[in-house]
Image: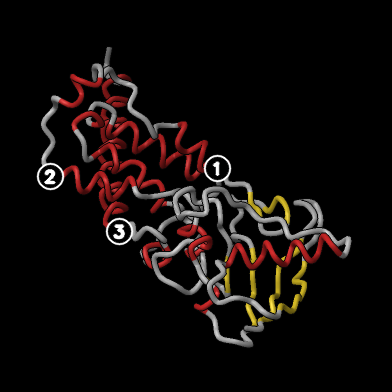
C-alpha cells in the first residue's frame, strides 16, 4: 500500500516545529505503525537525513511509551489500541496520515514526537504508593479481599500512564490518570490508611503541574487504550472532598480558642 505521512519535526523544545511530508510506497498492511516509521527512518538515515525521533520500548501495549497523535486521535483511530499495536491495515491505500506529539502545556515537546511526561512521575511521587507497614508477603496475602474490590483495583491498575487522556481532553486534564492511580489502592484494604491524604496530595500536584480541570467531556475514557472508566474520577472527587473537609476541620480546631 502507498501512504503519505505528514510528521511533526521539531529539533528541540526551544525551536519551532513544522509538519514535514514523506511519501511511502510498498508499505505492508501487516506492519505496525512503529515498524513503518522504523523503515522510514532507515531510509532517512541512508540519505544522511535526521531520523524521526519517537518514544518506544516494549512494543506490546504495556509500557505506554509509544504516545503520538495520529490524524488527531491519541494512538490512532482504533479503539483500545496503543500506537505500537496499531497496524497499517487500519488505513486505506493512498491515505494521508498526520502524526504529531501530545499537545499539552504539562507535556513539553523534547524532540519531534517525544514529549516530557515527568509530570506524571511527580504526581506518583506525591502518593502513588503504600508506605504503611502491611507485613511481609504471607501477611499481606492473608488479608481477605472481595472479588469485586479486586476486579476494580485490577481495572484501575491497567492504566499504563501513556497520557492519551491528557492529549484527548480539551482542557488537557490528567484526572483519569490520577484517579486510576489512586483507585488501584483505594479499592484495597492496604490502601485505606492513606486513602484520603493520597487523593489530596496527588490532585494538588496534578494542578501544580499545569494540567487542566476535568469538565466531564469523557474524551479521556474514549481515548484510553486500556478502557479506564471515568467513574474513577467521580470516586477521586469524593475522596478529595473528604480529605479537604478533614484538613479544614483540623485547621479549625488548631486555630480555635486555646
Q: Under tag 2, what secondary structure?
A: helix
Residue 229 is labelled as 3
Alpha carbons under labels 3 and 2: distance apart: 18 Å
* Residue corresponding to mark 1: 119
**Viewer-side residue, 19 vs 29:** 29
Asked if the residue at tag 2 contacts the one at tag 3, i.e. Cβ–Cβ closer than 8 Å, the answer is: no
**Rendered image quadrant of residue 192:** top left
Alpha carbons under labels 3 and 1: distance apart: 22 Å
Alpha carbons under labels 1 and 2: distance apart: 33 Å
Q: Is residue 158 left or right of residue 135?
A: right
Q: Which image quarter holds the C terminus?
A: top left
Q: Position of residue 107 (x, y in %)?
A: 60, 51
Picture layout, residue 132 above or below residue 29:
above
- Colour scheme shown: secondary structure
Crowdedness of circle 3 by 10 Å Cα count: few (<14), some, many (20+)?
some
Question: Given this view, does label 3 or label 2 mark the residue nearer the observer?
Answer: 2
Picture layout, residue 57 above or below residue 245:
below
Residue 147 is labelled as 2
Q: Under tag 1, what secondary structure?
A: helix
Amino acid at each position: 500500500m502507498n501512504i503519505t505521512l505528514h510528521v511533526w519535526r521539531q529539533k528541540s523544545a526551544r525551536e519551532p516545529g513544522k509538519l514535514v511530508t514523506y511519501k511511502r510506497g510498498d508499505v505492508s498492511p501487516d506492519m505496525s505503525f512503529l515498524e513503518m516509521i522504523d523503515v522510514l527512518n532507515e531510509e532517512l538515515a541512508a540519505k544522511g537525513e535526521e531520523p524521526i525521533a519517537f518514544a518506544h520500548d516494549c512494543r506490546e501495549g504495556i509500557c505506554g511509551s509509544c504516545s503520538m497523535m495520529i490524524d488527531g486521535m491519541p494512538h490512532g483511530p482504533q479503539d483500545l489500541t496503543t500506537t505500537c499495536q496499531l497496524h497499517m491495515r487500519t488505513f486505506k491505500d493512498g491515505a494521508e496520515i498526520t502524526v504529531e506529539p501530545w499537545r499539552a502545556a504539562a507535556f513539553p515537546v523534547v524532540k519531534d514526537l517525544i514529549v516530557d511526561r515527568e509530570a506524571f512521575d511527580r504526581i506518583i511521587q506525591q502518593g502513588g504508593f503504600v508506605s504503611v507497614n502491611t507485613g511481609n508477603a504471607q501477611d499481606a496475602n492473608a488479608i481477605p479481599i472481595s472479588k469485586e474490590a479486586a476486579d476494580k483495583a485490577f481495572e484501575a491498575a491497567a492504566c499504563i500512564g501513556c497520557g492519551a487522556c491528557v492529549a484527548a481532553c480539551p482542557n488537557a486534564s490528567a484526572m483519569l490518570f490520577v484517579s486510576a492511580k489512586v483507585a488501584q489502592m483505594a479499592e484495597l484494604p492496604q490502601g485505606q490508611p492513606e486513602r484520603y491524604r493520597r487523593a489530596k496530595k496527588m490532585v494538588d500536584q496534578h494542578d501544580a503541574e499545569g494540567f487542566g480541570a476535568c469538565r466531564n467531556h469523557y474524551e479521556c475514557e474514549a481515548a484510553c487504550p486500556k478502557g479506564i472508566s471515568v467513574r474513577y474520577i467521580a470516586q477521586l472527587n469524593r475522596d478529595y472532598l473528604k480529605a479537604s473537609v478533614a484538613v479544614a476541620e483540623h485547621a479549625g480546631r488548631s486555630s480555635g480558642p486555646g
